[in-house]
């Protein structure tokens, strides 16, 4: 399960859910249900795989939403900077955090070793 693609994760989820359903029917055919089925190691592993796949898909969705949110905020900051540049008129816009342009460095002589 090392894929970063949403489509691949959805395909993995579908495969694991199919295996889980198949294993549940096999256990039911053997007469194993309820708490006895819950103790089955293969069934527990498949359920864990389903949870893992769903959690990863949810994380991908959250990351995509975060990127979209940050991109929206970036556009807002750029608009504020552009407005500040228009007000100033000198071509040096104030930084979004309120600080002005960087002061020139002082020319100190190099240290001797």
Image (cartoon, rainbow, N blue to C red):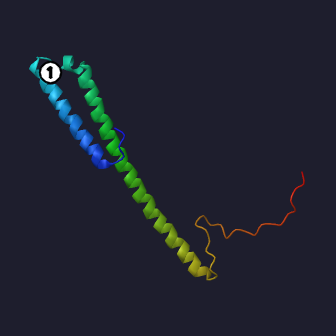
Q: Is residue 112 above or below residue 96?
A: above
Where residue 61 appears, as percent x and y from the top left, is 34, 50
Which residue is rendered at x = 30% and y = 40% of the image? 54
Secondary structure beneath dot 1 equals: helix
Task: Residue lying at the far right in this picture: please name it.
Answer: 112
Q: Is residue 63 left or right of residue 98?
A: left
- Quadrant housing residue 28: top left
- Quadrant housing residue 15: top left
Q: Is residue 19 left or right of residue 49?
A: left
- Quarter the N terminus occupies: top left
Task: Residue lying at the far bottom in this picture: please name it.
Answer: 89
- Quadrant housing residue 102: bottom right
Where residue 5 appears, as percent x and y from the top left, is 33, 48
Q: Is residue 43 left or right of residue 92?
A: left
Which residue is rendered at x = 61% and y = 74% of the image? 93
Q: Which residue is mark 1?
A: 27
Q: Is residue 18 above or below residue 80?
A: above
Task: Residue lying at the far left in this picture: please name it.
Answer: 29
């Amino acid at each position: 399960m090392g894929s970063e693609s949403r489509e691949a994760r959805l395909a993995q989820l579908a495969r694991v859910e199919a295996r889980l359903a198949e294993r549940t029917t096999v256990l039911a055919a053997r007469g194993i249900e309820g708490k006895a089925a819950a103790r089955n190691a293969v069934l527990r592993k498949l359920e864990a795989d389903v949870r893992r796949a769903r959690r990863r898909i949810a994380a991908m969705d959250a990351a995509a939403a975060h990127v979209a949110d940050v991109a929206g905020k970036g556009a807002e900051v750029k608009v504020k900077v552009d407005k500040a540049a228009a007000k100033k008129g000198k071509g040096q816009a104030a930084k979004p955090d309120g600080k002005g342009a960087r002061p020139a460095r002082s020319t100190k002589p190099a240290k001797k070793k």
